[in-house]
Image (tube, rainbow, N blue to C red):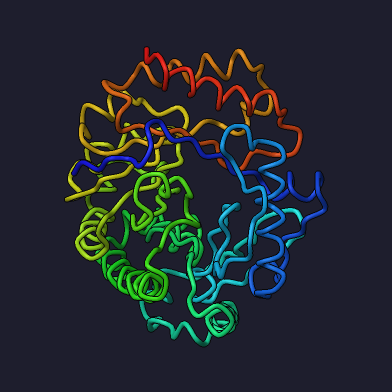
Amino acid sequence: MKIEPKIFLPVEIVFHPNWWYKNYGITFGWDYFFNPDIRLMIEQKMSQILYEKFGQYGYGQKNPVPEPIIGPVHLAAGFLISAIWGCDIKYYPDASPQVVCRKMTVEQLDSMPEPDPLMCKEFAALVKVIQELKQKFGYVKGDIGWHSLQNLALDLVGENLFIAYFDQPEMINRIYKKLNHSVLEIVNYIRRLTGTSSVSVNRSILNVDSAINLNSNCSIQMISNKQYEHFILPHEIELSKNLQPYGVHHCGNNMHTVAEGYSKIPDCCFFDIGWGSDIAYCRKLLPDAFFNIRLSPVKIKECTPQEVKGDIECFFKQVDSLNNVGLCCINMDYGTSDENIAAIFETVEKFKKIGF
């Protein structure tokens, strides 16, 4: 499925909470996520800081106004669905919330009924945020970070999940059917309220279509294409049928190893492609989808501006056309130089003007 971006060669950057904390003293505890007044104030401040540092590249807002946004737009944080399924969540001033694995057995997860989201303190707090913002502004926007079946199952079971792929495949398929239904219900609840589900997954979708439903397949890098097609693909097809327009976030460095499976998802229009993936091979199997190419935040912190430019040029030469390509660098840490960030914007601007 082909989709056209709103702008040619869009770029997005997102900083790690540690960058915000050490540079500006902004903290990301419970109140950032669930106190609407504090959330709005911090989002305003973040937008203004981005304008002051990178406004010359069209980033941030000079005079941002409060907006009734229910989830983070300048932060990568996916934890809510795991919390609904009973995982404890730890909050830190300088990091995104961390999910504590429940260490369930697959038998326990198989027998566990689908939870009521309102019994989760995080989801109940989110509903309260939505109600307060709606009362104050008359509407709400934004969404939450959500993720795939395997991500969720790993939060619930841990690494023994992979043993069950071999020992108890039928049970895994039952579990994934149940988890998929839960994910679909929660995502649909959010998008009925706000019209979006995935700006908090990767804000890059704003440059293409904010209605894209972007499924976070972070852990798919840990399995083979055969396992993906057997255990995950049938459920991902179900998500794609019910969550259009549909996209996949694959932040791992090996999307090419499961690109064949991804090519079997009907009407998948957007792929978030992890650093190190074979982009040319992925493009061969996925000729029409929008490719959002991810730079490595670790390398961006350590390399020179010239190396940044070289990496971007190498990426762009692997695609047939730049018309359905974008670039992002997510979770850049404290110590990343402004010069390297400027190199991202300036290199993309060069390609906008002259191409290859």
| Numbered label tally | 0
Q: Is residue 96 above or below residue 261?
A: below
Q: Give the residue at x 31% y 54%.
A: 166
The percent position of residue 236, horizontal first and vertical second, equals 26, 57
Q: Give the residue at x 34% y 26%.
A: 279
253 or 308: nearer the eye? 308
Quarter the N terminus occupies: top left
Whether residue 187 sits left or right of residue 17 in the image: it is left
Q: Give the residue at x 66% y 46%.
A: 16
Within the image, what quadrant is residue 186 found in? bottom left
Q: Give the residue at x 76% y 59%.
A: 27
338 or 302: nearer the eye? 338
Whether residue 263 sits left or right of residue 24 in the image: it is left
The percent position of residue 314, horizontal first and vertical second, equals 43, 16
Q: Is residue 241 above or below residue 306?
A: below
208 or 304: nearer the eye? 208
Residue lying furthest front in this view? Answer: 63
The percent position of residue 24, horizontal first and vertical second, equals 81, 49
Quarter the C terminus occupies: top left
Within the image, what quadrant is residue 338 found in? top right
Q: Is residue 131 above or below residue 196?
A: below
The percent position of residue 234, horizontal first and vertical second, equals 20, 58
45 or 246: nearer the eye? 45
Whether residue 253 sits left or right of residue 265 in the image: it is right
